[in-house]
Image (spheres, grey):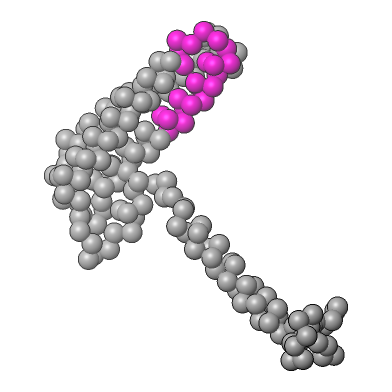
Amino acid sequence: MFQPSSHGKPDARVRQRGELDTTDILLGIILLFLVPLMTLAVVAIFSTRSDSGARLASLSEGEILPDAEEIEARWSAAERFYSQNAKKIVQQAVDAQDAMLKEQLRKWASTVLKNARADLDGVRMLIENDKHPELASRFAAYRDKITGVQKQIDSSQAELKKIDILGRDAQ
């Protein structure tokens, strides 16, 4: 089994074809466990949370409740997303002349409107916390603003439904 290596050293070992090597076996066993663990770690790092209200769902007694500054920041971002993005994309979808462009803009606008509604729902969830009903009365003005923007989103979605697949205005 022991054969001198090409270097002429008598203690060097040359592996014969089909012979098992303990170093290869140990590395294989280590990699068997290491690769899936690294994959899980990478997936966990790059995964995203789509629900902006997920933090509220996990509120426990020891967590800090949202303050006026947080509610204002989330409200402003959600309202700005609708007015500066979603509304303009809906208008582009309605005004587009090319049928394929119109259909693509309609799909895009529909997705953006769903995201805008999800952002507003996240703010509403922060305000309407069942464990802390005082938040609802404290931020009642925001609740009314959210309702107003959600009505605008409903009317924008109604505009999109008037566009048929061929890009012509539906009757």
Residue drawn at point x = 20 percent, y = 59 percent:
64
Q: Residue at x 46, y 16 (%)?
A: 93
Query: Would residue 32 be visible to someone looking at this image?
Result: yes
- Nearest the viewer among 132 and 9 is 9
The percent coordinates of residue 72 (x first, y second) are 19, 39
Q: Report whether residue 164 is seen.
A: no
Front residue of 60/167: it is: 167
Q: Image height check: is 170 above or below 61?
A: above
- Would residue 25 appear left or right of 155 to someone viewing this image? right
Residue 124 belongs to the span the image colors magenta: no
Name the dominant secondary structure of the magenta segment: helix
Q: Quadrant of the N terminus?
A: bottom right
Q: Is residue 141 above or below residue 69?
A: above
Q: Is residue 17 left or right of residue 92?
A: right
The magenta stretch spans residue 104? yes
The answer to which of 90 and 44 lies nearer the viewer is 44
Residue 62, placed above or below residue 23? above
Residue drawn at point x = 47 percent, y = 59 percent? 44
Q: Nearer the viewer, residue 65 or 137?
A: 65
Q: Residue at x 23, y 62 (%)?
A: 63
**Whole-percent x, y for residue 109 in the image:** 45, 25
- In the image, is residue 99 above or below residue 33? above
Residue 100: x %, y % from top left: 58, 16
Image-quadrant location for residue 154: top left
Q: How many marks?
A: 0
The part of the image, by quadrant, that contains residue 62 is bottom left
Give, as a single range, the part of the protein colored magenta. 93-114
Left or right of 121 in this view: 38: right
Question: In x, y percent, where is residue 43?
Answer: 51, 57
